[in-house]
Image (tube, rainbow, N blue to C red):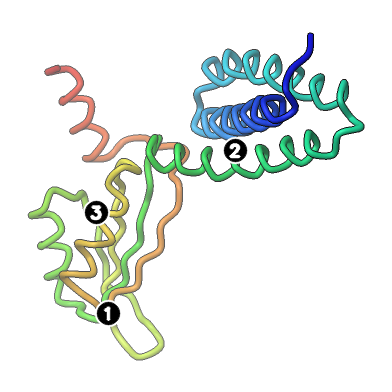
Amino acid sequence: MDIHPLLLVLIIFSISLSFVTLSTIRMILTLKGYQYSAAALSVLEVVINILGLGLVLDNIANVQNLLAYAFGFAAGIVVGSKIEDKLSLGYVTATVISQDNSGALAVQLREKGYGVTDWETNGYEGKRSSLQILMPKKQELKLYKTVKELDPNAFVVAYDAKTIYGGFWIRAIKKRNMVH
């Protein structure tokens, strides 16, 4: 089979881009606990990768094919990361530290629908208010914006929550799921 060299470069680039994008999504699914979906996706990922590598190796004398594979790989990382941002699977725990230890920020965030646990803490320059907020990852950026509007000087750090058990928030989710 004789394929035009430019078309071959585009095919190799597309295959490599697809492979790495799927690889990124598979890794995210694995980390978020969707092992069966990740396993199913890995079958497609391997087939695509073997096709791409086969095309490169069959035409190894053409450096443009190798470069197409490499640039497709790099583009796949970017595309996979963008898809991860859109999927926003799982939950995030955010810790907000405010210089205002009156409890007002916690009340305002609760009024906006966030589940907030708060306590008084001590910082380098005195008393602080620490707030812990658990939310779906899809709400993370909205929380940052809300906190910035309510307390521009607040310190916020967030991390993925892998295991969640008990508490007010979980009971509320279960009730919502039972109603729907």
Position of residue 79 relative to residue 43, above or below, is: below
Position of residue 168 relative to residue 112, above or below, is: above
Task: Determine which quarter of the picture holds residue 1.
Answer: top right
Q: Position of residue 81 (x, y in %)?
A: 51, 43
Asked if labels 2 and 3 touch by Cβ distance under 8 angstroms, the answer is no
Q: Quick one: 10 or 121, which is closer to the camera? A: 10
- What label sits on residue 142 in the rendered view? 3
For marks 1 and 2, give the one nearer the viewer. Answer: 2
Q: Which residue is mark 2?
A: 76
> Which amino acid is tagged 3?
Lys
Residue appearing at x 80%, y 37% in the figure: 66
Q: Quick one: 49 or 2, which is closer to the camera? A: 2
- What label sits on residue 3 in the rendered view? none
Q: In what quadrant of the picture does the C terminus appear?
A: top left
Mark 2 lies on a secondary structure that is: helix
Work out whether mark 3 precedes mark 1 in sequence or the reverse, and give the earlier one: 3
> Which amino acid is tagged 1?
Asn
> Which amino acid is tagged 2?
Gly
For marks 3 and 1, give the one nearer the viewer. Answer: 3
How packed is label 1: few (under 14 Cα within 10 Å), some, or many (20 or more)?
few
Q: Which residue is mark 1?
A: 153
Residue appearing at x 38%, y 47% in the figure: 92
Asked if labels 1 and 3 touch by Cβ distance under 8 angstroms, the answer is no
For marks 3 and 2, give the one nearer the viewer. Answer: 2
Q: Is residue 40 left or right of residue 128?
A: right
